[in-house]
């Protein structure tokens, strides 16, 4: 006979290698009863320890490696149920399966054992087949508990890594927000009779909204407000790219280029060069500082407003198509005039949202 198929007296085969990861403690004041159980358990492949009393068993249970306790009910000094109750109070990393050996068949006795924390019962005299079946049940429970612990450990590690990445992303986003707000440049500038105030306040870390002022001749100032569809980093990067377009020769945003033509060229650039599903809304306004004459183009952006000195508010513009949606889209130049004390207000939909 091989060690893996050692045949017991009751005719059932053992598998000595399959149970080696489970440690069993046998507690009984009878040396003969302990010997019988220990021999049987080792033949089945369990790691086995033994104790003659409850206090001795508790000392052994404080060391790692005891997964199952098989204890006699009637013992001097500390009974099996009392040992079970003390066992449940021990600090353990994993669950311990507790089986009571008893000749008591009364329901009151079984209830007492369950109240003390016992998991199962085996009647005396012990039948090997029954004991093995009870142990297999305990094994399934312990294996599930170990698997759950392992998954919990993996989840804890994953959460720690996610928290670390979240902290790193938070720092990057905070820096990105600082860089985006720096694109605005001077928040307030006085140019002759005109005062220009710019404000950028992202609702999240970063976004697709941007305001700015473009260089021009001494008697004119050009301001814009744009909003790239979507949210987050992609929209913010595209907004920065479009702002660079507006201030470069790519759109020829100079005094000879009407705002409507700038919007049309921006529409073409988004479709041909940006290469994404994003689009942008825009208001571009050119203001003559001496006369107060305004020419602006609107590309799907919220309507500009003129706040008159007397308190009246006039909305101007013709709506227009967002830039980056329709190839060949055209835009209109809308004239207006500012009197001393009037204000031209350009906002994105971030204000209303």
Image (cartoon, rainbow, N blue to C red):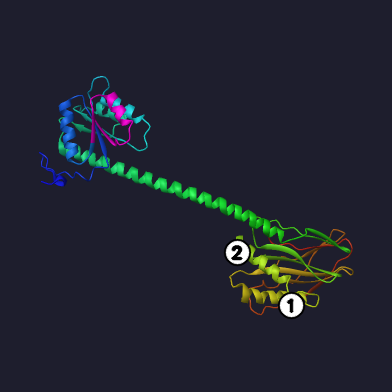
Near-viewer residue (339 or 179): 179
Considering the image in quadrants, where does the C terminus appear? bottom right
Tell me the SS state at disc 2.
helix
Q: Magenta span has 55? A: yes
Magenta range is 48-70
Of the numbered discs 2 and 1, the one sitting upstream in the chain is 2
Residue annotated with mark 2: 234
Pointer 1 local density, CA inside 10 Å: few below 14, some 14–19, many at least 20? some
Pointer 2 local density, CA inside 10 Å: few below 14, some 14–19, many at least 20? some
| Residue 334 visible, this orientation | yes
- Furthest residue toward bottom: 328
Which label number is shown at residue 261? 1
Q: Magenta span has 338? A: no
Near-viewer residue (211 or 338): 211
Q: Position of residue 266 (x, y in %)?
A: 69, 74
Q: Residue at x 71, y 74 (%)?
A: 263
Q: Residue at x 30, y 41 (%)?
A: 142
Question: Could you say which quadrant of the image residue 207 lies in?
Answer: bottom right
Q: Is residue 27 above or below residue 346?
A: above
| Residue 319 visible, this orientation | no
Question: Could you say which quadrant of the image residue 102 lies in?
Answer: top left
Q: Residue at x 76, y 63 (%)?
A: 346
Distance between the Cα atoms at labels 2 and 1?
26 Å
């Amino acid at each position: 006979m091989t060690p893996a198929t050692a045949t017991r007296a009751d005719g059932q085969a053992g598998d000595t290698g399959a149970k080696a990861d489970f440690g069993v403690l046998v507690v009984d004041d009878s040396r003969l009863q302990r010997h019988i159980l220990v021999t049987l358990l080792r033949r089945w492949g369990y790691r086995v320890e033994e104790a003659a009393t409850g206090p001795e068993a508790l000392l052994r249970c404080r060391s790692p490696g005891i997964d199952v306790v098989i204890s006699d009910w009637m013992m001097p000094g500390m009974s099996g149920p009392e040992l079970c109750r003390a066992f449940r109070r021990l600090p353990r990393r994993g669950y311990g399966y507790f089986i009571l050996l008893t000749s008591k068949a009364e329901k009151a006795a079984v209830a007492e054992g369950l109240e003390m924390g016992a998991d199962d019962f085996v009647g005396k005299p012990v039948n090997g087949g029954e004991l093995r079946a009870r142990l297999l049940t305990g094994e399934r429970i312990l294996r599930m508990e170990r698997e759950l612990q392992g998954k919990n450990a993996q989840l804890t590690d994953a959460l720690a890594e996610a928290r670390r990445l979240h902290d790193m992303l938070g720092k990057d986003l905070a820096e990105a927000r600082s860089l985006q707000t720096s694109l605005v440049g001077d928040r307030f500038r006085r140019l002759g009779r005109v005062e220009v105030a710019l404000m950028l306040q992202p609702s999240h870390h970063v976004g697709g909204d941007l305001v700015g002022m473009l260089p021009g001749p001494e008697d004119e100032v050009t301001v814009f407000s744009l909003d790239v569809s979507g949210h987050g980093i992609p929209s913010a990067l595209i907004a920065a790219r479009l702002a660079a377009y507006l201030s470069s020769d790519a759109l020829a945003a100079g005094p000879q280029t009407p705002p409507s033509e700038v919007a049309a060229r921006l529409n073409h650039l988004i479709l041909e060069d940006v290469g994404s599903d994003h689009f942008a809304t825009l208001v571009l306004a050119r203001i003559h500082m001496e006369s107060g004459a305004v020419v602006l183009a609107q590309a799907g952006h919220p309507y500009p407003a003129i706040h008159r000195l007397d308190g009246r508010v006039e909305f101007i513009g013709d709506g227009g198509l967002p830039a980056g949606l329709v190839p060949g889209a055209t835009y209109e130049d809308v004239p207006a005039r500012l009197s001393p004390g009037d204000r031209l207000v350009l906002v994105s939909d971030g204000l209303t949202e």
